[in-house]
């Protein structure tokens, strides 16, 4: 089944404790992205990757890191989480981007993170 | 700058038709997306318009006017399962990013 998977789905942690949220897609998509969703603010893009070893900042990258060593995986790393990073996180992928064909993004199920 | 505006909430009755509007401002236009998101779930793709006009997909249609910076999503024969948030979005940042509106929460009443 074609899908985007994220782990963990739920996480409660404490300030300063490094964590990684994994994202994997099995559709051979080139484009991958991380978003956070907060009430009243909608989905905001954190980082995106257009291909292996190519990553770039989105609109809210502060406090986050990513890597794209393999095409299928795009982990999100919080080196020192803070309470303002409490949010719902979505990973997404697409074959193309912009006005290219097959540019619809497929989203993972989400990771609900609470930082105390 | 770049901006998207959608109504925060809408309510409609089962079986009715509802139109969800989206206005946008962007320096370079690369199409407009609509996504549906049920509470607690991931967004799912509904439509992508890059040319002016109406595109129909079953009960859902999406309209675009590039000159007016305006799009709408039309939902016909509303069903209870259509209760969800509807997000419009456009490619930004040289079309490598996706900028979302805050979403319109649609409630379908029996």
Image (cartoon, grey):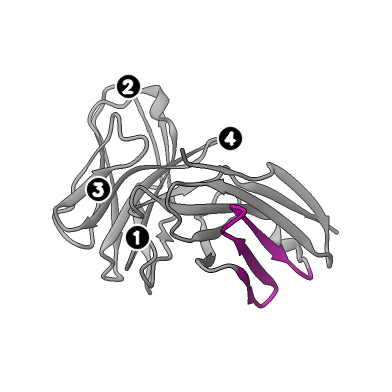
> Considering only order in the chain, which callout, 3 or 4, is on the residue closer to the N terminus?
4
> Considering only order in the chain, which callout, 4 or 2, is on the residue closer to the N terminus?
2
Queried whether the magenta region covers residue B66, the answer comes back as yes
The chain carrying label 2 is A
The chain carrying label 4 is A
The chain carrying label 3 is A
State which region is magenta.
B53-77
Given residues B56 and B68, the one toward you in this image is B68
Q: Where does label 4 land, which residue? A: A40
> Considering the image in quadrants, where does the N terminus of chain A appear?
bottom left
Q: CA distance from mark 2 to mark 4?
A: 24 Å
Task: Specify whether residue B43 is in view.
Answer: yes
Question: Which SS class for mark 2?
Answer: loop
Q: Left of B24 or right of it: where is A49?
A: left
Q: Neighbour class for label 2 at 10 Å: few (<14), some, many (≥20)? A: some
Q: Neighbour class for label 1 at 10 Å: few (<14), some, many (≥20)? A: many
Q: Where does label 3 land, which residue? A: A75
Q: CA distance from mark 4 to mark 3?
A: 26 Å
Task: Give residue B68's position: percent from left, percent from top.
Answer: 62, 53
Q: Where does label 2 land, which residue? A: A15
Q: Which mark is residue A47?
A: none
Q: Where does label 1 land, which residue? A: A93
Question: Which SS class for mark 3?
Answer: loop
Question: Which SS class for mark 1?
Answer: strand
Residue A113 sits above or below residue A50 on the image: above
The residue drawn where x is 33% and y is 41% is A58
Q: CA distance from mark 1 to mark 2?
A: 29 Å
């Amino acid at each position: 089944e074609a899908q985007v998977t994220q782990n963990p789905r739920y996480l409660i942690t404490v300030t300063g404790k490094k964590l990684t949220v994994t994202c994997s897609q099995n559709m051979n998509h080139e484009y991958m992205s991380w978003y956070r969703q907060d009430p009243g603010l909608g989905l905001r893009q954190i980082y995106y990757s257009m291909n292996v070893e190519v990553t770039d900042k989105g609109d809210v990258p502060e406090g986050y890191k990513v890597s794209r060593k393999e095409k299928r995986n795009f982990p999100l790393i919080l080196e020192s989480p803070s309470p303002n990073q409490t949010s719902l996180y979505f990973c997404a992928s697409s074959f193309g981007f912009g006005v290219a064909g097959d540019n619809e993004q497929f989203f993972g199920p989400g990771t609900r993170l609470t930082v105390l | 700058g770049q901006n998207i505006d959608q109504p925060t909430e809408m309510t409609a009755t089962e079986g009715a038709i509802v139109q969800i509007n989206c206005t946008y401002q962007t320096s370079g236009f690369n199409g407009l997306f609509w996504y549906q998101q049920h509470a607690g779930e991931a967004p799912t793709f509904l439509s992508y318009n890059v040319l002016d006009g109406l595109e129909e997909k079953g009960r859902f249609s999406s309209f675009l006017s590039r000159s007016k910076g305006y799009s709408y999503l039309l939902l016909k024969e509303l069903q209870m399962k259509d209760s969800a948030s509807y997000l419009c979005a456009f490619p930004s940042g040289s079309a490598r990013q996706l900028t979302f509106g805050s979403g319109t929460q649609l409630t379908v009443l029996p």
